[in-house]
Image: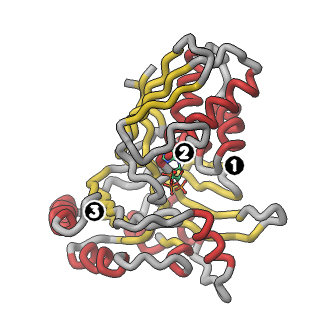
Amino acid sequence: MKVRAAAKLNLMLDMLKKLDNGYHSLFMVMQSVDLYDTVDVQRNGLGRILIESDSAKMPKDSSNIAYKCAEKFFEDMEISQCGITIRIGKNIPMASGMAGGSADGAAVLYCLNKIYGTGLSHAQLCEIGGKVGADIPFSLTGGTAVVLNTGDIIAPVNPLPDCEIVIVKPNQDVSTKEAYSMLDSLQRLRHLDRVGMLEALSKNDFNAICSKCGNVFEQAVEVSERPYIKSIMRKCGADACLMSGSGPTVFGLFSDKENADRCFNELNKYYENVFKCSAVSKGITEF
Ligand code: ATP
């Protein structure tokens, strides 16, 4: 069975508090975009989980998030016939803040539920996924949603008003773990206008949404190319531009398609990984 797994962007990412268990309680507005990994899951009769991919960089062993999701699924379902091959066509840049690994993991859970006829509900799949990674429940859900706490509370909201999204993944790797420790070491965190964002979303007001977009990781994680990328986006008429997740990806929202095209062409001269995307309403789609 073959599916597409969508990348996500954070329209808002604020930190509410650090929890006693070391995790962070977050307030996020997440958006799926039409930048997809392809995930093909087939039974193999070998009695073990195999990962294959066109990406040389992605781990193919038990550290792969797709592998971990399959393992957790078999364990929770008490299935011993766990011979499957997972083929991942990697298009979502890795360690970028776009949750590519979580998307792959979500896709595997979605496929295994169908292949093994386990009939798990969406909420049950999210519960298994949440044990592997915080972004997996949203990757299973997709669309536009307010995501709270450690990713376990997901409230779908109105779809993002029609716009174009230009995304740049600068050539810098950001470790999510290090990004959180940099956030923790900040003397003072400037919080975002979360209520204002909720009001803007409920009114479908694109300009207001853009004015409320923000990511507290920008206060902690230095991405050397970020100011330059943002300056080009603004010059090209972006209505908002910000970093996604713990970075380094930077994206711009454009109400005007020609401005987005201009921005894409300009950034494409300087960066290897530039994408022009649209918001989509699903995390996982079947072929
Ligand atoms: P998030 O936005 O959820 O923090 P991310 O986009 O920053 O995620 P990923 O691309 O999901 O990061 O990958 C983070 C790390 O996880 C990679 O550096 C890689 O070594 C490892 N990894 C494990 N499985 C996968 C996978 N299926 N795809 C990509 N990376 C994976």
Which residue type does callout 2 highlight? Ser
Label 3: which residue? 255
Relative height, residue 66 to residue 248 (above, below): above
Q: Quadrant of residue 187?
A: bottom right
Which residue type does callout 3 highlight? Ser
Dot 2 lies on which element?
A: helix
Q: CA distance from mark 1 to mark 2?
A: 14 Å
Q: In this rendering, does residue 199 appear at all?
A: no
Q: Position of residue 51 (x, y in %)?
A: 50, 31
Q: CA distance from mark 1 to mark 3?
A: 31 Å
Side of 234 relative to 134 (left or right)? left
Q: Residue furthest bottom?
A: 187
Tell me the tag on residue 152. 1
Q: Residue at x 33, y 60 (%)?
A: 167
Relative height, residue 57 to residue 74 (above, below): below
Which residue type does callout 1 highlight? Asp
Tell me the tag on residue 102. 2
Q: Quadrant of the C terminus?
A: top left
